[in-house]
Image: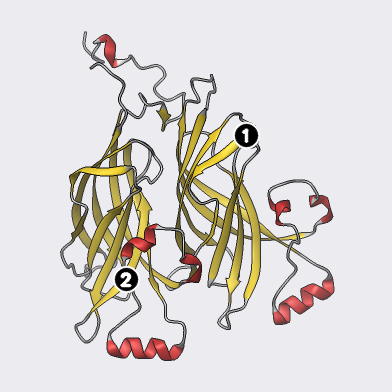
Amino acid sequence: MAGNPTVFLLMVSGQIESAEFPEFDDIYCRYCWVYGQDWVITSGLEEGITQVTKKSHDDRKLFVWNFPLEVTFKSTNPHGWPQLVVSAYGQDAFGRDVVRGYSAVHIPVTPGQHTRTLPMFVPESTSKLQKFVSWFLGRRPEYVDPKVVAQGEGREVTRVRSQGKVRVSFNVVTKDMKKLGYDTTPTDAGASTQPAATGIVPGAS
Amino acid sequence: MAEVHVIGQIVGASGFPEHSLFCKWGVHAGGAWKILSGTREGQTQVDNPQDEERANWSHPIDIHFSTKGLQGWPKLHFQVWHQDSYGRNELYGYGFCHVPTSPGMHNLECVTWRPAGSLREQISQYFIGGGPQLKNPDVVYTGADRCKLTTVTMGKVQLQLGIILRNFDKYGIEC
């Protein structure tokens, strides 16, 4: 292949595996990818919704979604590296949809298999009266746009309560990062392997 | 020019006496370093954990440095504050840690401390809160005037950072 690459690819295959929310039941998740201006999704969905799941009746009290995530990004610059934003929703006592937690995590920068546990948090009302009114009307405080969770700016004025955690696993593959000069693994690793360009297949006699 | 990307988050903090914590963070680097994109400081949300002891911030950090030299490798510094139900803020700890020098994913735990103050200040802090704070926060990441301080150990801040380096091997740097 002639010519130097100017873009690199990041491919992620993974799943929103499971969650623990001790006080709640019947939960589903919405997810979306948040990334910088230099990034573009070349395949896969930008957002999605999982099924509604009930917690297990054993001691683990686990919610399982096993929801596949498959996406490929193209970029010229690692700044703005994509993040997965997960929002969990459930139903309150009156049958209305309320938010149970938000969280965001960066896709790991090294190729390979990674598991992440995302602690979930919800915005909190400031006064006790507001808390009662929102419980009564079923309109809990929530973010207008969940993507806010993936930013650092503007967080200093929010008060949140953290509850529950969601487990996500990622399998990360990158292409052409090394050719563009980017290192995502330390120099010792892989120093002794044969370069693929010589046409030698490892293990072949 | 070599480049460093710091991509990750301030996950949370644990080991502090009270809940309802937030963190002010900043990054400091030597003269040869320049920030090409990303914010160099910020403040997390105030978190009140329901089920567990650890405060969860999940505050994203995405900074792109370029550098002409190895000296002055970037350091992240933190101030952990407690916000009580009346809205008052009390300093709970200072800490710093260097950005890791090798590429890849890193889980870091940054220890924190706060200034101790005289016996009188400690007694008043016990009853009404609000202990001494540093006049010059630079002391957190330099060793300059530390010998004059007496400090008390506080909790830890957890970070998860992914480091991408560019062109370091062209200059013969092994990391």
Q: Is residue A110 above or below residue A44?
A: above
Q: Residue at x 21, y 87 (%)?
A: A94
Residue at figure coordinates x 54%, y 72% from the top left: B19
Side (left or right) of B139 relative to B119:
left
Q: Is residue B57 above or below residue B163?
A: below
Q: Which residue does the numbered mark 2 point to in the structure image?
A: A144
**Position of residue A115 measured from the top left corner of the image (x, y, whole percent):** 33, 48
Q: Nearer the viewer, residue B152 or B91?
A: B91
At label 1, the amino acid type is: Ala
Q: Is residue B71 left or right of residue A111?
A: right
Residue in the image at 46% along x and 23% along y: A188
Q: Residue reaching furthest left?
A: A51
Residue A145 location in percent, x, y? 31, 66
The x and y percentages for residue B14 are 54, 62
- Closest to the observer: B107 or B35? B35
Q: Would you say the residues marked 1 and 2 are in contact, meaning their CB atoms lie under 8 Å apart?
A: no
Disc number placed over residue A97 in the picture, else none:
none
CA separation, marks 1 and 2?
Answer: 41 Å
Q: Quadrant of residue B87?
A: bottom right
Vertical placement of B35 versus A7: above or below?
below
Q: Does mark 2 fall on the same chain as mark 1? A: no
Reading the image, the residue beneath label 1 is B32
What's the amino acid at mark 2?
A: Val
User: Residue B17, how many percent across, how many down?
Assistant: 60, 70
Q: What chain letter is assigned to the residue under label 1?
A: B
Secondary structure type for disc 2: loop
Q: Label 2: chain?
A: A
